[in-house]
Image (spheres, rainbow, N blue to C red):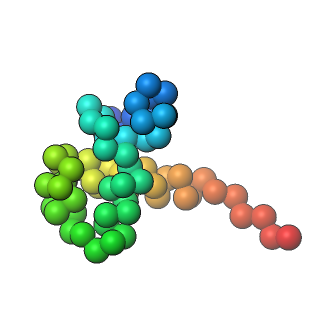
Amino acid sequence: MYEGRIVIDPEVRHGKPVIRNTRVPVDIVLGSLAGGMKIEEVAEEYGIKKEDVLAAIEYAAKIIAREEIKIL
């Protein structure tokens, strides 16, 4: 789902992942949710859709799932 909604373009926001056709970075969306905003509030605040917010969450989950933890 997130593949169609999250893009990385070196010409937009220095290559940070953003919501397609916007300059809204994924980290801002996630930070807003972490700060206590509801999905609908985030969507309204940044002029994006609920599905964009959910795509940002899914994108972050996929990144975390690929992390390797090395015990020292």
In the image, 13 versus 68, the foreground residue is: 13
- In the image, 72: left or right of 50? right
Residue 69, position as x, y percentages in the image: 72, 64
Residue 10, position as x, y percentages in the image: 49, 27
Q: Residue at left 22%, top 59%?
A: 42
- In the image, 53: left or right of 41? right
> Does the rendering let one see residue 1?
no
Q: Residue at left 27%, top 36%?
A: 22
- Image quarter (top left, top right, bottom left or bottom right) of the N terminus: top left
Q: Quadrant of residue 39?
A: bottom left
In the rendered image of this protein, does residue 5 appear above or below residue 61? above
- Image quarter (top left, top right, bottom left or bottom right) of the C terminus: bottom right
- In the image, 62: left or right of 1? right
Number of numbered discs present?
Answer: 0
Q: Quadrant of residue 44?
A: bottom left
Identity of the residue furthest to the top in this view: 11
Q: Residue at left 24%, top 69%?
A: 37
Residue 41, position as x, y percentages in the image: 16, 63
> Does the rendering let one see residue 71?
yes
Residue 6, position as x, y percentages in the image: 36, 39
Q: Residue at left 26%, top 31%?
A: 21
Identity of the residue furthest to the bottom in this view: 36
